[in-house]
Image (cartoon, rainbow, N blue to C red):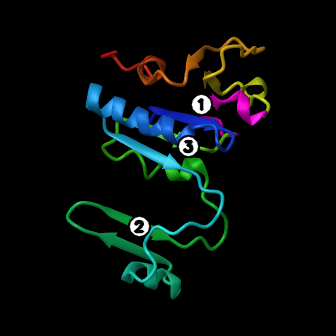
């Protein structure tokens, strides 16, 4: 699987909304099958408190598989260390055209930085050659690297940039 692009940035920059917009764009305009892979910094709950699958996990099951006619999920208890992005990507390539990775801002995959001046944070892309563009709402952003600056509010521009960068033929 080589059609992987990271969407990285500081908390509150708009990564999740951009990924939501890109999923719609890729599905509606190119009929692509999209996998969204998100990094969570803390423990999270996949199921609702009181549901059977939640109770199984809370009682110590190492793996819980939840399935219905519309979706399925596997919840694994981590006993040693958090799995790497590379290990998780192995699960993402089954019948998928493109993987959008949220987070893992220091990973070695191609990434687009989501940046907003209002957060008053440093640009991640100025110290990481894996960033291939910056998506921002800033009109005055000055960067030292020679990567494109994309309008964060123009999903079509960002989507087409991603497809071209990943060498999709039908762009």
Going by the image, does 15 lie left or right of 169?
right
Residue that appears at 54% across and 25% down: 152
Report the span colored magenta. 106-120
To which residue does mark 1 refer?
A: 111
Is 68 covered by the magenta stretch?
no
Say if residue 89 shows up in the picture.
no
The disc at residue 72 is none
Secondary-structure class at tag 3: strand
Dot 2 or dot 1, earlier in sequence: 2
To which residue does mark 3 refer?
A: 102
Compared with 6, 48 (above or below) is below
* Cα separation between marks 3 and 1: 9 Å
Is 113 covered by the magenta stretch?
yes
To which residue does mark 2 refer?
A: 74
Q: Residues within 10 Å of mark 3 (few under 14, many from 20)?
A: many
Q: Nearer the viewer, mark 3 or mark 2?
A: 3
């Amino acid at each position: 699987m080589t059609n992987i692009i990271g969407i990285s940035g500081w908390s509150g920059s708009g990564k999740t909304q951009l990924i939501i917009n890109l999923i719609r764009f890729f599905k509606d305009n190119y009929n692509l099958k999209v996998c969204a892979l998100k990094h969570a910094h803390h423990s999270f709950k996949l199921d609702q408190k009181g549901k059977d699958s939640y109770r199984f996990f809370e009682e110590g099951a190492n793996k819980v598989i939840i399935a219905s006619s519309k979706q399925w999920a596997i919840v694994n208890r981590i006993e040693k260390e958090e799995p790497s992005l590379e290990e998780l990507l192995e699960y993402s390539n089954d019948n998928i055209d493109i993987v959008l990775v949220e987070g893992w801002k220091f990973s070695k995959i191609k990434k687009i930085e989501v940046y907003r001046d209002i957060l008053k944070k440093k640009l991640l892309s100025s110290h990481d050659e894996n960033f291939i563009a910056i998506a921002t709402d800033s009109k005055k952003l000055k960067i030292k690297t020679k990567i494109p600056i994309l309008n964060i509010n123009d999903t079509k521009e960002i989507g087409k940039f991603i497809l071209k960068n990943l060498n999709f033929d039908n762009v």
